[in-house]
Image (cartoon, rainbow, N blue to C red):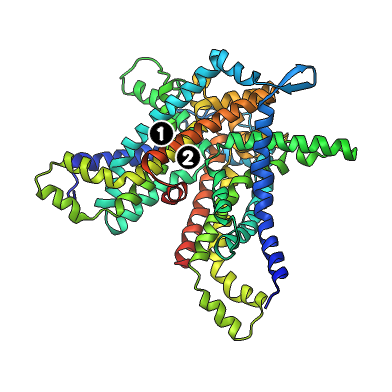
Amino acid sequence: MMTKSAQRLTLFLLLAPAILWLGLLIVLPHVEILVLSFSERVAPRVYAFGFGNYLEFFTEPLYWRTFARTAGMSILVTALTLVLAFPIALYIARVAQGRLKAMLLLLCLLPFWVSELVRTLGWMMILRETGVLSYVLQATGLTAERVEFLYNDGAVILGLVYGGLLFMIVPLANALESLEPAVVEAGFDLGGSRWTVLRRIVIPHAMPGIVAGSIIVFMLTVGNFATPVLLGGKNGLWFTEQIYAQFITRFNWPQGAAFGMLLLLLSSAIVWLGLRLTGQSLGTTLKQA
Amino acid sequence: MNRPSFAWKLYIAAFYLFLFAPLLIVAIFAFNASPFPSPPWRGFTLEWFTGSGSVFGKPGILMDPIWLDSIGNSFKVAVPVALLAVLIGTVNAWVLERAEFPGKTVLAMMMLWPLVIPGVVLGISILAFFSRVANGLEDWLQTDLDMLRPGLPLVVLGQLSFILTIATLIIAARLRKFDRSLEEAAFDLGASRARVLRTVTLPFLSPALIGAGLVALLMSFENFNTTLMLVGSDAPLPITMYGQMREGATPAINAVSLLLMLGVGGIASVFALTSKAGR
């Protein structure tokens, strides 16, 4: 039998990697950007405490408009992804059987194992002026000249929805899986139309999946960088791009840190709100996915 | 609801077409004999893989030091990330499933945090924190600490910050299914603690260890957001691809994407096989 102090030592050694990881790579770095975001340059190489970086955010329209646009478009993308993914998840969970079911789910997973940049490259090649879509339209005589489909909000939304689909389908299908067929039958037997059964039985049952999927898709969308920048070009205007510009291009780290804190706040607020409104916990939500 | 309407089936078919269209386009145009990655189709070529550059002015990816170096850099990051993720993830899983101590639920919650932090924010926070540490240590020790400046070692740390969560979850899920009486039987038969670990527990965990390693490898190879903030002069593959996509690339980028897809397909099938064997 081990003595008490030996047990303590073992526990400490087992805990050490986790504490080093969370302390050095998560907690302290976030304390650092929090402190940095409240520091202002008062003279060359001299910094003092102040709210200047946050004031700058509210007074410069480019910054807060980009922030609001990122939040708004992310909500739109999440809603679109949910609507597009629902029939697919319902089909996979309720209609498809055996081998077809496994295959449909696997086919859904495959594109998402591939790098985000490869998927975005595919959309760029389809949408751009010299791309596949424009070429097909010209070849079939539908348009006389080249058409540019890239570098607008539609392209950004398309790319972001595409990137979010899997993270919506999997939790939705998991939630719908446990729906008793008898309950659905009862709904029809009691005279409910397809629409009523969907609205009153299927959607309430899928709620945990809807919440989990929506939270994950929103988080991924808000934090995305490559898709809005590459598909939107100069019109992409995503908030992560502002963080990058302050940190890497302008080397204004305090301003960038303030933007980072704001993005973190937005992302956490929506996650918290989603969980609160539906009474779910973070652990079970992540498990759904 | 068991008789899907025709419209529903049509929607499913259209959806899968939509899902695979961009990947197919990328793959097909890797073989187009044209200096631009766009239609029309000008004939089949392997020039973008193995060409020396005499035909289109730019070499194929297997002859181009830019692409070869970035693939090499990606491996220099992904291999340490995967090894450390499995090693530390196993210890973490042990803490979550076997140890009892005050504050365990808090620690378990904190381990999930990295998944809800945007990758860009993880990147800048680690960049800022390690720069401060480096500045402090350099003043004190009077030496240069390039390890903590933007570059591949910092990319490894940045990626580990969230990949560790994934590795921990995968390994902990497997450990939870372990039947403790197997270990007890081995102890009763006189085996030492180290021997039980080596001959009973680790073999049971091995599918999860391989799975976690492969997922970590893949996530590291494909990570863009966090890496972008921490990268120095040596660019891993996604950073090089991003640069080329902004400037307007040759079909070489399609060739490198196709190799990436084949690699992912390979890893995914190994993963599917090991997880099936583990069930």
Q: Which mark is residue B27?
A: 2
Residue A209, how many percent across, how many down? 36, 46
In the picture of the structure, the residue carrying the numbered disc 1 is A161
Q: Is residue B244 visible?
A: no
Judge the density around disc 1: few (<14), some (14-19), many (≥20) Cα neighbours within 10 Å. Answer: many
- Is residue B216 found left or right of A85 in the rendered image? right
Q: Is residue A159 visible?
A: yes
Three-letter residue code for mark 2: Ala
Residue B231, how many percent across, how many down? 68, 36
User: Who's the residue at 47% across and 40% down the image?
Assistant: B27
Looking at the rendered image, the quarter that the N terminus of chain A falls into is bottom right
Q: Chain of mark 2?
A: B
Q: Chain of mark 1?
A: A
- Identify the secondary structure beneath mark 2: helix
- Is residue B201 found left or right of A151 in the rendered image? right
Q: Quadrant of residue A137?
A: top left
Residue A87, how many percent across, how many down? 28, 41
Q: Nearer the viewer, mark 1 or mark 2?
A: 1
Q: Quadrant of residue A163?
A: top left
Three-letter residue code for mark 1: Val
Given residues A236 and A27, the one toward you in this image is: A27
Judge the density around disc 2: few (<14), some (14-19), many (≥20) Cα neighbours within 10 Å. Answer: many
Q: CA distance from mark 1 to mark 2?
A: 22 Å
In the rendered view, tell whether residue A188 sits above or below residue B133.
below
